[in-house]
Image (cartoon, helix red, strand yellow):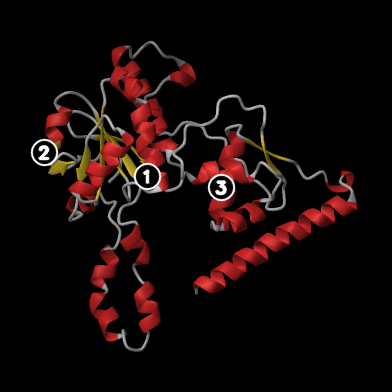
């Protein structure tokens, strides 16, 4: 589902067991409907808590927040009670609504079921692995901003950047509301006629694998992340200078995801990546840094082979 489509009306049970209908929420204003893969998991917790923390901001633009996943009602209830959410969590246990919005994983696996069964004996080991992502993360992490007439205004998709969902949805609604109230208040490049469906500028940083990463000790406001959020673990790991490869090896994280998250933390000012000065760096320091990076890469390779 993309911006401009009509969102389907649906009824699901919330975390209290009460039936809730999308059109009922839309009668009071726009709805920000965010799908998350698994209740109480680290990134999903960060995503949902950020929506909770921006309660006043969403209220100021007249928007309501709804969380939805394929978790059962009792699991949603535990999640909501544990994190003190001030908005409903909907249970899409059979995945029908997720399918309607196009964020449900595993559809192709169902279509291949007959082929899979026929080859099960010959390739048993690989069959067990097929569809693992769909079982562990049945829903793609996606947020929809829906107008009162059920028109999808904005779609935010990001699996790893938990906070971007609430941030971009709020940014869009603030500008969308402003442009509707005063269409001539903005001029030139500030006009939002075509900018409604663009994302705010981001400053992703491409961090070299061997670059030393350190925590900025001058950071006064520590981020309000959940206890088990992987970004908090990365910050703790960087109290001593480490390369991206070393961080990934120590925390048993995928190298690409680690590099992305480190770059995001650098852009946000929580970490600093020392630039590679080339000829100006003493050869012994350069050699030690490369050796540490290689050790980290070997550890990641050994870990992957063990899982195989």
Q: Which residue is drawn at 22% across and 35% down?
A: 88
Q: Earlier in the sequence, mark 2 or mark 3?
A: 2
Residue 116: give x, y in percent of width and height: 29, 79
Q: Name the mark nearer the viewer: 3 or 1.
A: 1
Residue 250: give x, y in percent of width and height: 61, 56
| Residue for badge 2 | 18
Label 2, label 1: how many angstroms apart (C-alpha)? 23 Å
| Residue for badge 3 | 260
Q: Earlier in the sequence, mark 3 or mark 1?
A: 1
Determine whether 299 is above or below 182 in the image.
Answer: below
Asked if residue 158 can be seen in this view, the reply is no
Label 2, label 3: how many angstroms apart (C-alpha)? 39 Å
- Answer left or right for 130 relative to 283: left
Location of residue 15 by image quarter: top left
Q: Do the residues labelled 3 and 1 touch (CB within 8 Å)?
A: no
Residue 291: give x, y in percent of width and height: 77, 60
| Residue for badge 1 | 44
Q: Residue at x 30, y 58 (%)?
A: 105
């Amino acid at each position: 589902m993309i911006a401009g489509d009509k969102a389907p009306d649906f009824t699901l049970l919330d975390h209290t067991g009460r039936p809730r209908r999308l059109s009922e929420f839309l009668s009071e204003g726009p709805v920000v409907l965010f799908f998350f893969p698994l209740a109480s998991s680290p990134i999903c917790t960060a995503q949902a808590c950020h929506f909770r923390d921006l309660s006043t901001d969403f209220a100021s633009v007249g928007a309501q927040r709804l969380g939805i996943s394929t978790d059962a009602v009792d699991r949603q209830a535990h999640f909501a009670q544990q994190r003190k959410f001030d908005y409903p969590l909907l249970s899409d246990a059979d995945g029908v609504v997720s399918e309607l919005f196009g964020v449900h994983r595993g559809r192709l696996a169902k279509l291949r079921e007959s082929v899979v069964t026929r080859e099960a004996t010959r390739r048993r080991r690989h069959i067990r692995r097929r569809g693992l992502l769909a079982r562990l993360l049945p829903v793609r992490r996606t947020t929809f901003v829906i107008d009162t007439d059920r028109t999808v205004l904005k779609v935010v998709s990001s699996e790893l950047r938990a906070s971007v969902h609430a941030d971009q949805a709020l940014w869009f609604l603030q500008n969308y509301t402003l442009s509707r109230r005063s269409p001539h208040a903005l001029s030139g490049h500030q006009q939002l006629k075509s900018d409604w469906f663009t994302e705010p500028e981001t400053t992703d940083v491409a961090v070299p694998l061997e670059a030393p990463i350190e925590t900025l000790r001058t950071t006064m406001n520590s981020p309000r992340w959940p206890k088990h959020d992987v970004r908090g673990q990365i910050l703790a790991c960087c109290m001593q200078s480490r390369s991206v490869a070393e961080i990934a090896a120590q925390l048993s994280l995928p190298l690409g995801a680690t590099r992305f998250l480190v770059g995001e933390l650098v852009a946000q000012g929580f970490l600093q990546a020392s630039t590679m000065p080339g000829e100006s760096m003493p050869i012994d320091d350069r050699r030690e840094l490369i050796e540490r990076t290689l050790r980290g890469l070997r550890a990641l390779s050994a870990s992957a082979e063990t899982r195989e």
